[in-house]
Amino acid sequence: MFAAPAFVFGAFFGWHRAGKFGGNRMDKLQYAVAHGIAFFLIALVLTVFADWQGWV
């Protein structure tokens, strides 16, 4: 439920973070993908947990 928006938010966050560190476009892309996948997996686990608990 929240996994797709979490990926997008993580990608924006990673892109911004790489920009703060002075990275070029490929560095920003790598950070965006890595953060997007990490945020996606965290949101997916939390969604499964919420469903398992009956909160959703």
Image: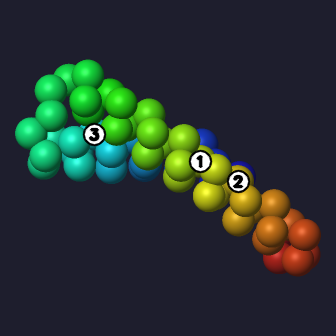
Q: Position of residue 3 (x, y in %)?
A: 64, 49
- Answer with the quarter of the image where residue 12 lies: top left
| Structural distance between the alpha carbons of marks 1 and 2 | 6 Å
Residue, disc 1? 40
**x and y, in percent, of residue 15 in the image:** 28, 39
The label shown at residue 13 is none
The amino acid marked with disc number 3 is Trp
- Using residue 36 as the reference point, say whether residue 19 is left or right of it: left
Residue sitting at 70 percent across and 54 percent down? 44
Amino acid on which the number 2 mark rests in the picture = Leu
Q: Which residue is mark 3?
A: 15
The dot on residue 44 is 2
Q: Secondary structure at mark 3?
A: helix
Q: Considering only order in the chain, which callout, 2 or 3, is on the residue closer to the N terminus?
A: 3
Helix, strand or loop at mark 1: helix
- Can see residue 27? yes
Q: Residue at x 60, y 43 (%)?
A: 4
Question: Disc 3, disc 1: CB below 8 Å?
Answer: no
Residue 50 picture location, percent across and down? 79, 71
